[in-house]
Image (cartoon, coloured by chain):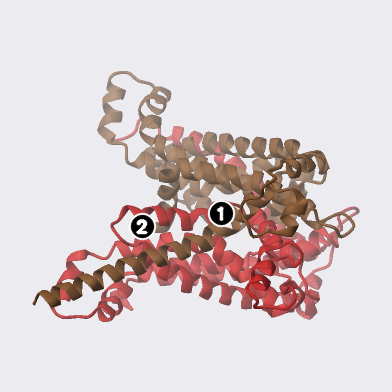
Chain colours: A brown, B red
Amino acid sequence: MSQAIHDSEGAAWWKTVLLHLAWILAALFFLAPMVWSVANSFKPAAAALADPVSLFSEAFSLENYRRLEHVGAGWHVYAGNSVMVALGTVLLTVGVAVPAGYGFSKFRFPGQTVLFVVTMATLMIPFQSILTPLFLVLKFLKLQNSLLGLVLIYATFQLPFSIFMMRNAFDAVPKALIEAARIDGASQWTILRRIMVPIALPGVATVALFAFLNSWNEFLAALIFLSDQNKFTLPIMLVNVSSGIFGIIDWGALQAGVTVTMIPCLVLFLLLQRYYVRGLTAGAVK
Amino acid sequence: MREPTQWLGLAFITPSFILIGVFFLLPLAMTVWMSFHNWPLLGRASFIGLENYQELLGDQQLWRSIGFTALYTVLVTAALFAVSFPLALLVDKPLRAAGLFRTVYFLPVVIGFGAASTLWLWLLNPDSGVFARLLSDLGLVQSAPRPLENFWPALGVIILMVVWKSAGFSMVILLTGLQSVPSELMEAAKIDGANAWNRFRRITLPLMRNSILLVLVLNVTSSMLAFDQFFIITQGGPQNSTISAVFSIFLASFTSYRLGYGAALSLVLLVVLVAISSIQLAFLRTRPEES
């Protein structure tokens, strides 16, 4: 009897060990590429070439980041462009999707269902398939090769997800609360600002986070619509570094660039993970 | 109770419809219009009827790229599922550590495909890349492998990269499915003597039907739109064998500047995508007991 108990304890112990082993092996697979790249970005070129595998080099160096300063207009310019595009997209998306979600949630007007379906249809038709005419639309509006043009496009394609999120957020606000405020003489604007938005704030955080990450990371539209070297965003800078000069690629500068591009996303995600998962599951149950 | 100002709702949604109208509906209509034209970047467009579509039927490079995109989509969707399902089972534990590892596996999802592709371009390069060095240090290869010089190795490393980048995403969706299985049902089956495999096959899998379908829909549609990794890592090579569908639209419209032909290609891609998502959505809507 005691032997049997001992055996099952042994089995449970082995199971725990195996589980932890599997957890750690998978973690190595997902972490290693990023860790290697960041580690090599701080090595002098000779050390990185001699031993790319080791994580630490005796000679810590920022020379890769200094060389990235001489890539095109310099990485500060590209990082600045990326920040402006991402923040612009966040502001425009939130500014447009919050009222739209409110309108769809709390009002009844003719054509409402059709308009909502049209909004959601944008989800099914990817922007990659309308890039060619979008290029002409931007040209007509004199917005080609401009960061503002990129912001307008990014925000438009954030709208279906964002409006859906905001409508759900406003649906959760009890009607009695609004009636009470109205009886107390509050205007529509006051109701939106004082009651609705505070309750819907977590939804706003989710919408803003997705708008930031998607516009920060977007590659194809930026590649097509930006032609002026000073207007590039970080992903376009990376491609320029990775295509090399006369066939020679500066791997050190490339890794510094990759590090600069991915760290903000990782930090934002780790800080705001709760809001990210909320957006993901909202999309999943839709 | 009646709302006092119905029309105010329309005012609230107007800004969103200005954007959707100008940057979505208008270009959508223009795609159709442009596809019937010879439309150069500079100069006048001329109406040519169905000529773009006729050319499209005989365009061998296009059919090759459509075939490649289909192959890539099938392989990557299968690979993602094969990796993310075990991952979801692995982190579906009520332990603090499981939550931590969940976050770790998800991390590559939040960095962009552009950054991820350039990162892997370095990992894979034969001179200073980690893979070549690791393999030769372990004595597995004599000289540094050059996976991008042949089709299957190139496709293989792209699939590995995409699995690394997006398995975490599929994992989270499958995890929501796993967690929707009521634990009482599991306990009851356990008491009735069902073993782990039977519990998984008879209870977990049927109840996860919707999240499995959702993962497949999302991975199929996003793989069909793949561009960044082929533009950056394989650059369409070797010998134009890894040019994806979106890549060929890019080449027609923005390298050859044949906007009309690019629009025709876009329309074909769009129809295929909408058809696939509608079929899959129809599957999602039918409840398990109806099928």
Name the quadrant of the N terminus of chain A: bottom left
Query: B249 or B264, which lies in front?
Result: B249
Residue at (68% x, 52% y) in the render: A219
Query: A4 or A217, which lies in front?
Result: A4
Q: Which mark is residue B98?
A: 2
Name the quadrant of the C terminus of chain A: bottom left
Q: CA distance from mark 1 to mark 2?
A: 36 Å
Question: Callout 1: helix, strand or loop?
Answer: helix
Q: On the rendered structure, is A73 left or right of B83?
A: right
Q: Give the residue type at disc 2.
A: Ala
Instruction: Residue lying at the far front in this picture: please name it.
Output: A58
Q: Which residue is mark 1?
A: A122
Q: Chain of mark 2?
A: B
Classed neighbour count for the residue bearing mark 2: other residues with Cα under 10 Å, few (<14), some (14–19), many (≥20): some
The answer to whether one can see residue A15 in this image is yes
Q: Position of residue B41 (x, y in %)?
A: 86, 54
Q: Position of residue A77 (x, y in %)?
A: 75, 36
Residue at (79% x, 70% y) in the render: B52
Q: On the rendered structure, is B182 left or right of B235?
A: left
Whether B216 is drawn above or below A257: the answer is below
Instruction: Residue lying at the far top in this picture: please name it.
Output: A185
Query: Which quarter of the picture shows residue A142?
Result: top right
Whether B112 is drawn above or below A196: the answer is below
